Image (cartoon, rainbow, N blue to C red):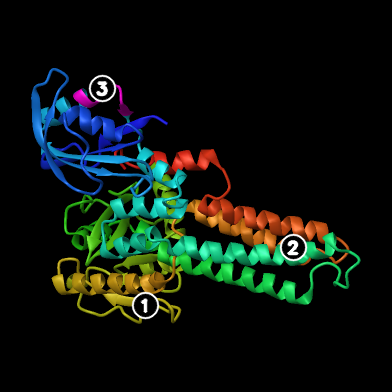
Amino acid sequence: MTSIIAPASGTAKSGVIVIRVSGNNSKKLIETLSAKACPKPRFASLRQIFDNDGNIIDNALVLFFEGPNSFTGEDVAEFHIHGGPSVLAAFMSAALKTNFVELAKPGEFSKRAFRNGKMDLTQAEGLADLIDAETEAQRKQAIRQMRGDLKNQAHIWRNEIVDCLAEAEAYIDFPDEDLPSGLSNTNRNRISKLSTSLKQHLDRSKSAQKIRDGLNIIIIGAPNVGKSSFLNAICGREAAIVSSIAGTTRDIVEVSFILKNNLISLADTAGLREANDIIEQEGIKRALEKAKDADLIFGLASNKEEAEFIKPHLNDGDYLIWSKSDARDSKLIGSIELKDTISEIEISSQNPDDIYTIEEIIIQKCVTTSENLEIAPLTRIRHYNAIERTISHLDNALMIDDDNPEIACEELRMSARALGEFVGIVGIEDIYDRIFSSFCIGK
């Protein structure tokens, strides 16, 4: 296999850049560029690095990791060079001119680690999530996935399926033995419990996934009710245009920001009203569609009529926000009938204390969402698809009558295969390519 090379620490100007090499020619490249024997594995050596004409490029710290005891499982070399653009360009040019290495593709180092059994697919995805982590909760979740929590859970599930399959196949392979036809009651109970366990994990993961993707909050309300001012006050910048002209916001204005170490996606939407303008109608349609997928909706109203109009779009756990409290004397809380599961609060976007109260509501929602952090959650659509197919095949097996044990066994095989795809046991090249191509070069 071709040896590959790439900067592992990015290419921006810096004090030090790490160049990573993987493959059988790693040792040769060290010896050629430094004109010295390769250092002992895992021992750092300060070397002069020369170009192909014998000119000094830089002084570098050189390390060698002998396979399989390396990140990729192959021989790996690291060159810690000074991080100037000209140094990097000269080093890469000299390395490539040796013809010992080729430039790595995005994610190729991690893909080799997967191929060589150093990690499974879920751990590789955890590594990608760790690199992209913006919050402490995201980092912790990625670390647990990278260390193999999700992989280990998947193997427990798969081993249970294989055990159930072995028992079911026993009747087919040994029909003369005194064995029950079809699935035994014990086996049915095991399959049923496993299916229930998978369904529970699926449900719990949906809330834990918000840690990775961010809490999705939508602001809805009538035109000119103060939605844009509300968004700007919460995110702390002028993200949306504020105007006294009704209907200024016609499309969705979405802002992502970090609030007390939580990733938040906050969206301002077109004002809800009976509109004749085609563009405004489309904006209202998009607002209502966006609200369907929200984790939390803030419905803003400055009077009873506006509140009654948006009330049907508020769900359990959402908030009716009586806005512009500084512009009226009377209180509006309790003035319309609401479900007990919908809270209401009066605020002024100009009052820092009121905005602090809203922030605390958001933080509490994040705390509730992250209660499932201790599980090894499913974090990607691929995970959900694999687990849903696993559950479907398990439930199908339970529905097969005792006269068709072969069909029940086939359903169990398909469920085991779905979990095999989940961790990468079963060969699925198109999925591998999609996963690793999303990595940065050098990782």
The structure residue drawn at horizontal position 45% and vertical position 49%, both measured from the top left corner, is 117
Q: Earlier in the sequence, mark 2 or mark 3?
A: 3
Horizontal and vertical percent for residue 418?
Answer: 61, 53
Q: Earlier in the sequence, mark 2 or mark 1?
A: 1
Q: Marks 2 and 1, how far apart in space?
A: 45 Å
Work out whether residue 232 can be spotted. yes
In the image, taking residue 215 as reference, residue 229 lies left or right, namely left
Q: Which mark is residue 397?
A: 2
The structure residue drawn at horizontal position 29% and vertical position 39%, both measured from the top left corner, is 442
Name the amino acid, label 2: Ala
* Mark 1: secondary structure: strand
Quadrant housing the C terminus: top left
In the image, taking residue 167 as reference, residue 129 lies left or right, namely left
Above or below residue 347? Residue 131 is above
Which residues make up the magenta segment? Answer: 94-102
* Mark 2: secondary structure: helix
Image quadrant where residue 259 sits: bottom left
Mark 3 sits on what residue? 98
Specify whether residue 11 is painted magenta: no
Mark 1 sits on what residue? 343
Q: How many marks?
A: 3
